[in-house]
Image: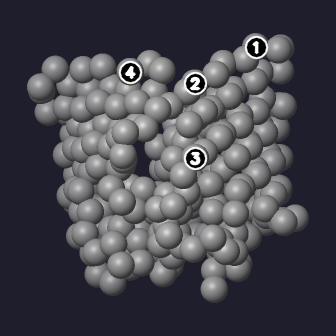
Amino acid sequence: MKTNYSRLCSVNMNKMVTVSLILTMLCSCQNVEPLNLKRDFCRLAKRTELIGGHASITYTWKDNTRTGDGTITEYNDYGSITRYIEENGHNYTFEYDDCENFCKLTKKTEEGTLGDRIVTKYTWDGNIQTSDDGTITEYNDYGSKTKQIQGQRISTWEYTGCENFCKMVSSSAQQHQIPLTETKYSWDGNVQTSDYGTITEYNQQGHIIRFQMTNGHGYTCVYTDCE
């Protein structure tokens, strides 16, 4: 079986960025979907900036709950986030169904510190997810997004070599049939290079262990329990 490892590794993310990172699986320390059985999953232990004093954050774990940067993140046994609590108390809960190949999100609840509550539900037809707001997202059998239609905006992703994790080779977006962006990626082993120069290195489970931009900024990540 495969799991969808969404991870929240950034510090002081605002609400919109937090939601985006959770649901798009584009978190700073993880943005591809690794092959995994229901067992111990890779747990982020430390993140270190490449420059600027090499500031680092050390994370601690108790069972499937992670703390360390002022936030609390709870995971299920497949590595999918079930609850995320921001430092200010704002929190999100996530419910899933059918984790046979990857955990399929069926409900997201957002609760603010002033008592406001927003519930979003998702329905599935095979690997196609439809949300309350009409957004349609298609996944491959490994839990990686391949296409998303959100209003007039259409995004697509292509991958290769899903033996250990799906390696993204291209991504694109268009709106009103007008191309907006297109990015190509090349691979050397587990090291990905984008056509605009960023370098991303992954471990065998598909977690980012190094990300570096052309200006030298970036970070490294260390994990435990990846065996």
Q: Amino acid at mark 2?
A: Thr
Q: CA distance from mark 3 to mark 4?
A: 20 Å
Q: CA distance from mark 1 to mark 3?
A: 26 Å
State the residue position of label 2. 120
Tag nearer the camera, 2 or 1: 2
Q: CA distance from mark 4 to mark 1?
A: 22 Å
2 or 3: tag closer to the N-terminus: 3
Q: Position of residue 78 (x, y in %)?
A: 63, 63
Outermost residue to the right: 62
Q: Is residue 92 above or below residue 132?
A: below
Q: Position of residue 5 (x, y in %)?
A: 56, 59
State the residue position of label 4. 134
State the residue position of label 1. 116
Q: 212 or 190, which is in the foreground?
A: 190
Q: CA distance from mark 2 to mark 3?
A: 15 Å
State the residue position of label 3. 97
| Residue drawn where x is 51% and y is 47% of the image | 104
Q: Amino acid at mark 1?
A: Asp
